[in-house]
Image (tube, rainbow, N blue to C red):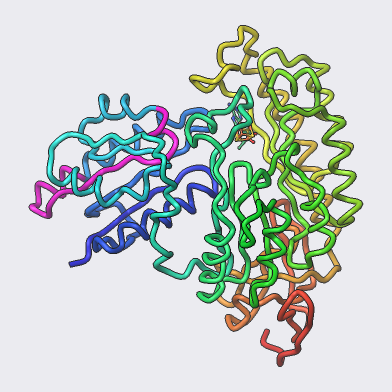
Amino acid sequence: MSKKLFIKTWGCQMNVYDSARMADVLAPLGYRPVDEPDGADMVILNTCHIREKASEKVFSELGRLRQLKDVKAEVGDGRMIVAVAGCVAQAEGEEIVARAPFVDMVFGPQTYHTLPEMVAKASRKAGSVLNTDFPVESKFDFLPDESASQGVSAFLAVQEGCDKFCTFCVVPYTRGAEFSRPGAQILAEARRLVAGGTREINLLGQNVNAWHGEGLDGTTWGLGRLVRELADIDGLERIRYTTSHPRDMEDDLIRAHAEVPQLMPYLHLPVQAGSDRVLAAMNRKHTADDYRRIVERLRAAKPDLALSGDFIVGFPGESDADFAATLRLVTDVGYAQAYSFKYSARPGTPAALEHAQLPEDVKDARLAALQQLLNAQQQAFNESFVGRTVPVLFDRVGKRAGQLLGKSPYLQSVHADANERLLGRIVEVRVDAAHPNSLAGSVATGEYRSSATGTQTVEATV
Ligand code: 5AD
Ligand code: SF4
């Protein structure tokens, strides 16, 4: 009999990927995904610990789940297994077990392949199963193949964990040491995805460009080589990767941007701050000028490359002059899109112990100033497309009937009136209007690009 599984996911794309893989592991046990937690046989909260209020959100969600769990038991509908997974589970597992004893399972990101054992244990005994190990084996060797099509645009985790230890960040503690999946495993997963209808693959990793995996020839490959091998897969039209660290931006990967047409002209390359003093205190291991030079090399290889970044304002000890250096760097680089955050002290990280924590109002003012600049850059970037034609990969239906949504090469969301037959295809779209977070367009002709190298014509299908 099929059992209902509800997974709620917070945080990064890696968590989205992990949630899909947890569903894959649970499918042979009879669990089928549902859209609501009410009446579910298992509810998993896949949590994020990167910024503030993570655990409060989890505990308030758990409060609601407790009621649903009680209702299910009272109406004689069986037991709801409640689980907390992800980085909050890894960082605060014991506290969750102590504060919310009705939670049946608490487990960290490296244990998902052991879910069947944990479910068996939780079903047998009362009390919580806690598993925050970093097992010696790689979960990727034990996770089953994907059970369902992952859609036109799919994620593929190639790397996990981080050895960089930026002083503000929990990732090296919650996800563990850097690990690169072997090339053969990644290529096999990519082929399965493409056979299931995927046209775009987003390679994922906390430090994706630190990927150094075993190649098919037994040598160690870098990400540039992996991208070239992926580009040989028939039917795979677009390749992206995220998130990258400036220090791992190797020449071969930069060259791949010039040489591999399937590699999209978009790069998320966080710098965090523009002041060398702050960058050193963050343990970023590069200066602002190092970053400027990397951007120059990237743009020399791929002049139309759209850049995205992450920024933290109000790092402990950040002065007005330091913050002004961040604004200068943003002005020099010019971002198509970016994420910016107020520094939040994360328990267990070195920066949280600094005395010079900044007042909230200073952080608020700096965040507002930075976001104003970044928003203006994004708006200008989007407006520069009005009147131009861009190839859009339609990956889902829009809210309005007859509308499709897709992405430009530069990761802008584009919506246009288009026939559903164009789903999964790359279509030339003329941009009619630019909004802060999307473009509106019309299908330009009956033409669509069937591969990165050729153009085919179909009858008009608008
Ligand atoms: N405070 C604020 N932002 C943070 N990030 C990571 N840790 C913190 C923190 N303690 C941001 C960084 C990172 C992004 C994923 O989240 O900018 O690149
Ligand atoms: Fe965190 Fe720094 Fe590693 Fe990125 S590189 S995951 S910010 S420690």
Ligand 1 sits in quadrant? top right
**What residue is at 54 percent from the left and 49 percent from the top?**
13
The image shows a total of numbered marks equal to 0
Q: Position of residue 378 (x, y in %)?
A: 78, 48
Observer-nearest of 151 and 337: 151
**What residue is at 45 percent from the left and 51 percent from the top?**
18
Q: Position of residue 311 (x, y in %)?
A: 70, 33
Residue 32 in sight here: yes
In-image side of 415 versus 105 (left or right):
right
Observer-nearest of 167 and 216: 216
Q: Is residue 5 above or below residue 99?
A: below
Residue 378 in sight here: no
**What residue is at 83 percent from the left and 17 percent from the top?**
321
Observer-nearest of 450 and 244: 244
Q: Position of residue 446 (x, y in %)?
A: 74, 86
In-image side of 170 versus 336 (left or right):
left
Q: Position of residue 60 (x, y in %)?
A: 34, 33
Q: Is residue 431 above or below residue 9?
A: below
Q: Which image quadrant is residue 383 in?
A: bottom right
- Magenta residues (range): 69-91
Q: Quadrant of the N terminus?
A: bottom left
In-image side of 183 versus 60 (left or right):
right
Q: Which image quadrant is residue 143 in?
A: bottom left
Magenta segment includes 125: no
Q: Is residue 357 above or below residue 438?
A: above
Q: Which image quadrant is residue 424 in?
A: bottom right
**What residue is at 62 percent from the left and 18 percent from the top?**
360
